[in-house]
Amino acid sequence: MTHTKEMNFDGLVGPTHHYAGLSFGNEASTRHRLMQANPRLAARQGLAKMKALADAGFAQGILPPHERPHLPSLRRMGFSGSDQEILARVAAAEPQLLSAVSSASAMWVANAATVSPSADSIDGRVHFTAANLHSKFHRAIEADTTSAILAAIFASPSHFRHHSPLIQNGLFSDEGAANHNRLGSFKKPGIQMFVYGKDMLGDATGPLRYPARQTLQASQAVARLHQLRPECSMFVQQNPAAIDLGVFHNDVISVSNEQVLFYHQQAFADTGAVREQLTRRLAALEQQFVPIEVPADRVSIADAVQTYLFNSQLLSKANGKMTIVVPEEVRGHRAVWETLNDLTADGSVIDQIQVFDLRESMRNGGGPACLRLRVQLTPDEYQAVNQRVIMTPARFDELNQWVDRHYRDRLCQQDLACPQLLNEVRTALDELTQLLGLGSIYDFQR
């Protein structure tokens, strides 16, 4: 890497990937509840996307799955005995709880953390705050392991600063980068746009049907921790009506890259004001803002949620244009596919569409953008990253072989109590940490 650029770190799907419908407000998750899952296929689909983007010249890294089922969480709830005895008791008495502590939701690493590049922070370091994911129990248990993983990958204190997750309280409910956009050049200070669902201390206006998972107070706290210059941060409210239609995170309704914001007309509570503020703030930094708005009369919010058009990746190419990465579901919807093709055909900065089959993830409500955490790095910062987590042809082959050795090709909720599954997961993860040079990041390894 010869200049500052964005690197995508994708979450590797875990061995306990299954469909439990745990995420109220995520309509795909609810719709596919109790279907049979294929963890091996899910992991292979994610790896195929990482490899294809790395082959195309985009910097690509890997974030490992978490230990699941998470026995330490069950022990903290008063369950005792051997691991096998605890699994049996929870499966018999509270199968939904066992499903929650077995969820492979950590694969959606857009929720892992909020990341601010060194160009925007007063101390000139890249800042990481692991999300507390307070609004969903099965995700709230991820924060400590996420922090350990990020610290193992971005270990240099002179380049990287790690912050503890925010307090586990509804006032500071934080869902990470899924509600965070950074606009502007990778080489200069830019604008970090934090999108919140509700101001918990101000106007009570918010969604009525589904919960607002990101609070204004959480976004403001992260900005303070990251030492962002006031001119580099702004806070905007997501459209409450969109949340009630299934837009549980901002990354379901908009995506940014450098100077571009690709968004739905009804994405924000006041979309016009957001557009005007971004234009003015980027101009003050001597940069241009390029809004690409998709009108509601061409793509409804329901269509956007069904296809995950905006849960896409925008990637900068060497020629100054951008590739948009979308799931197969976009191509399968005629109106959405025509809209996207019209966009790329009229001289737009987005001139290439790349489609991936991510069906195993999509059925649980996670598209291309959910699967990746964006980290902007200077050349020196890139060299300070644990190089063993960077996707290469050799690493791709090793990880596919690892998946084939350890992952099942079918998994249902009733399989989670199987003592052998726990042994399979721990054996797999112990081997993975050695392959990726991560050290002892899991509870069972300590």
Image (tube, rainbow, N blue to C red):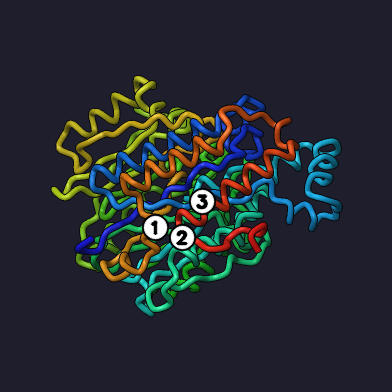
Is 433 drawn above or below residue 403 in the view shown? below
Q: Position of residue 212 (x, y in %)?
A: 59, 49
Describe residue 204's horizontal placement relative to residue 229 as left or right: right
Q: Which quarter of the picture shows residue 75?
A: bottom right
Instruction: State if disc 3 and disc 1 touch (CB < 8 Å).
Output: no
Task: Assess disc 1: are there few (<14), some (14-19) or many (≥20) residues with their C-alpha within 10 Å of its C-alpha.
Answer: some
Q: Position of residue 116 (x, y in %)?
A: 40, 65
Looking at the picture, which amino acid does disc 2 mark? Gly
Determine which residue is flagged by label 3: 432
In the image shown, does 129 or 410 lie closer to the viewer? 410
**Residue found 42% across the figure and 51% down from its top:** 62
Gap in Å between the C-alphas at discs 2 and 3? 8 Å
In the image shown, does 103 or 407 lie closer to the viewer? 407
Instruction: State if disc 2 and disc 1 touch (CB < 8 Å).
Output: yes
Is 132 drawn above or below residue 32 in the view shown? below
Instruction: State if disc 3 and disc 2 touch (CB < 8 Å).
Output: no
Looking at the picture, which amino acid does disc 1 mark? Arg
Regarding mark 2 in the picture, which secondary structure is present there? loop
In the image shown, does 399 or 205 lie closer to the viewer? 399
Residue 30 seen: yes
Looking at the picture, which amino acid does disc 3 mark? Leu
Q: Which quarter of the picture shows residue 336?
A: top left
Determine which residue is flagged by label 2: 437
Q: Earlier in the sequence, mark 1 or mark 3?
A: 1
Gap in Å between the C-alphas at discs 1 and 3? 11 Å
On residue 388, the disc is 1
